[in-house]
Image: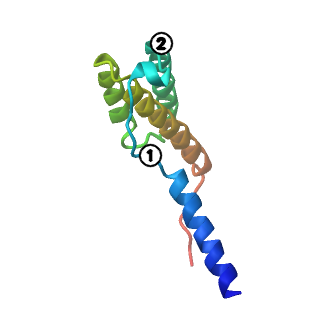
Amino acid sequence: MRLTLILLVTVILATAGCASNGGGNMGDAASSGVSKDSVEAAIKAAEAANKEAGAVNGLWRDADKMIKEAKAAASKGELDKAMKLAKKAESQGKMGTQQANEQKNAKPWLF
């Protein structure tokens, strides 16, 4: 039983270590296949998602800042960074809309 537990923990840690390889080299746009058009489309999608979130009072704090940073990165030619920021901003917009819609009838709990 103890050996099984040790093996299980080892497998979990090894798998988590392989999955968390996010600190590597960002590379350039040519190596990643990110185009200027796809970045512009991603920024427009992020703006639309955040406009929708704002309409239902669900705009998250950093979403607009990320869109501005994505535009700045795109203008500097940092397409990978711009795409990452735009996708994250779009995700925040969608989650903000979902959160606002799910909690629009929320009331305080009375214990």
Residue type, numbered disc 2: Asp
In which image quadrant can residue 71 be found? top left
- Residue 45 horizontal side relative to residue 36, left or right: right
Q: Is residue 43 visible?
A: no
Of 98 and 80, the residue lying toward us: 80
- The x and y percentages for residue 47 are 45, 25
User: Which residue is at a point 39% across and 46% down the rendered structure image?
Assistant: 23
Q: How far is the residue under mark 2 from the one under mark 1? A: 25 Å
Kind of residue indicated by mark 1: Gly
Residue 68 is tagged as none
Residue 5 position, x and y percent, is 65, 80
Work out whether residue 65 or residue 11 is closer to the camera in this orientation and state it: 11
Kindly give the residue lying farthest to the top in the view shown.
Answer: 37
Which residue is painted at 50% across and 17% down in the image? 38
Pointer 1: what residue? 22
Q: Which residue is mark 2?
A: 37
- Residue 21 lies, with reference to residue 1, above or below; the image says above
Q: Are marks 2 and 1 in contact (CB under 8 Å)?
A: no
Q: Quadrant of the C terminus?
A: bottom right
Q: In the rendered structure, which disc, 2 or 1, sits on the residue that comes first in sequence?
A: 1
